Image: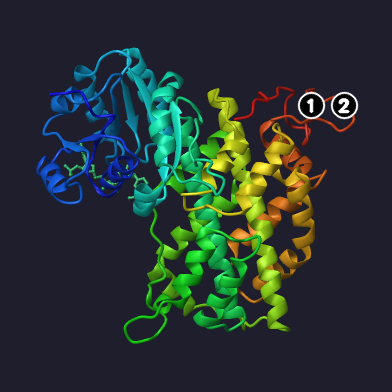
Amino acid sequence: MNASADIGLIGLAVMGENLILNMEGKGFTVACYNRTVSKVDEFINGRGKGKKIIGCHSIQELASVLKRPRIVMMMVKAGQPVDDLIEQLLPVLEDGDIIIDGGNSLFEDTIRRTKYVESKGKLYIGTGVSGGEEGALLGPSLMPGGSPAAWLHVKPIFQAIAAKLDDGTPCCDWVGEGGAGHYVKMTHNGIEYGDMQLICEAYHIMKEGLSMTPDQMHQVFKEWNEGELKSYLIEITADILAKKDEDGQPLVDKILDTAGQKGTGKWTVISSQELGIPITLIAEAVYSRCVSAMKDQRVDASRHFPRPDPRFPGNKQQWIQDIRNALYASKIISYTQGYMLMRAAAQHYGWNLNYGGIAQIWRGGCIIRSVFLGQIKKAFDRKPDLSCLLLDSFFNKAVRRCVRSWRKVVSTAQRKGIPVPALSTALAFYDAYRSAWLPANLLQAQRDYFGAHMYERVDRPRGQFFHTNWTGRGGTTASGTYTV
Ligand code: NBP
């Protein structure tokens, strides 16, 4: 058979099928294969009919129809299936051929697989693909990382199928070596958890604190979507609040209040713990889903504890302004923390991440797309080595403008018994981050008291450690001063 296909795609589920149609629509010839081979024929005779798509019934056949260097993209369930497929692909590929994993793989797996595939003379890319079914078909946000030599060959296809900004910039660029692409995708998902939780807390306050109906809240989110909060998630929230069930009642009120999750938020928090970076907002967003899932316990507990009157006193319109400001300031904190995490990961894993470029990739096609990301891109254009987003002049000014509202909203919600974990942890982080002094002196004293962990002194140079015999009973032997 002629080697005529530009790329091969394995995995004909929702993402794979739509990516193939997207690639074909951009002029590429695509070969496809699926473990359950009957799905290949169904696809070729269904949505793929009459298109430049070659259905293959084996991995060998797939390899035989690909132009050199061969590019094979896997869109299958993350985990063992990816390792299994790599083992099946390696014997049918030649040196310099490229394997791409477009699934939601853990970045550590991608680091391992990149090394392994490279050791076999082939190249590997682990890429984040965001935007769901519609994004895959019409233009996803793509975050590729892995073997740099592979990018030259994959770039024309990826940048052709990616979402485009108004000026034509593709929402896809090289992210970095090894697992960098999947790390950035994981962080994207963590930030997505944070954005969603913040919106839910704003909704909670409006619903219970301001007694607003879904229709009224729909109007508020619609207005918010015309300003600095303009984003896909605010837009779909407005749509959701307007949706009626078959009986004409708001559908949102009929949906059970227990959230699911598939793990990428959890992975982000685990990585942050390992790197020692406080992504407190994303962590609260993950835990909030866990609390929501304890429905039966919550219903039981609600009978045992009195509930304060949740109504916010005063002018409703003013509160809506204040909630918007609180949400915006908290969002700035969330992205500040997310970028801190990526910076620490880049240092730890030896990646050269382009932070402004990442904001650009996220500007379109993905779930967290927003005008806000345009401001992040500008911040890194102003100062490419910006260590903390909060210190950028634009975000600094924005937080200062919002801080009064933010404190008002968080303190009133707490007084009124409305849980606002993301809004309040963001404020706590802001207050801690802007504090030249924190009570960790006492904490160090406690550690030294019970464990001889030693402390540094304000009146001595950094790096000199001291131990005190606090009780007069201890010895003079100190513990090591390492930090984990
Ligand atoms: P699924 O995650 O549901 O995976 C189904 C595909 O995996 C099928 O083609 C299936 O083949 C194949 N597969 C499985 Br399961 N085990 C396999 C194995 N051992 N060997 C070979 N193939 C195997 O599909 P999806 O929702 O399209 O997602 C694909 C990837 O993209 C996942 O990693 C997902 O996390 C990621 N992703 C999904 C979305 C989304 O919105 N759905 C968005 C972004 C990223 P079969 O037909 O023979 O069972």
Instruction: Give the quarter of the image for residue 53.
Output: top left
Front one among 358 and 478 = 358
Residue 201, placed above or below residue 434: below
Kind of element beneath mark 2: loop
* Residue 144: image tag: none
Q: Is residue 108 among what the camera can see?
A: no
Residues packed near mark 2 inside 10 Å, few (<14), some (14 to 19) or many (20 plus): few
Q: Which residue is mark 2?
A: 460
Residues packed near mark 1 inside 10 Å, few (<14), some (14 to 19) or many (20 plus): some
Whichever of labels 1 and 2 marks the residue nearer the N terminus, that label is 2
- Visual colour scheme: rainbow
Indicate the position of residue 194 as horizontal and vertical percent values. 54, 55
Instruction: Give the quarter of the image for residue 389.
Output: top right
* Residue at horizontal 40 percent and vertical 35 percent from the top: 158
Asked if the residue at tag 2 contacts the one at tag 1, i.e. Cβ–Cβ closer than 8 Å, the answer is yes
Q: Quadrant of the N terminus?
A: top left
* Residue at horizontal 47 percent and vertical 65 percent from the top: 236
The total number of labels drawn is 2
Q: Amino acid at mark 2?
A: Arg
Indicate the position of residue 173 as horizontal and vertical percent values. 50, 34
Q: Which residue is mark 1?
A: 466
Q: Nearer the viewer, mark 1 or mark 2?
A: 2
Q: Taking 402 as reference, is 61 left or right?
A: left
* Residue at horizontal 38 percent and vertical 73 percent from the top: 255
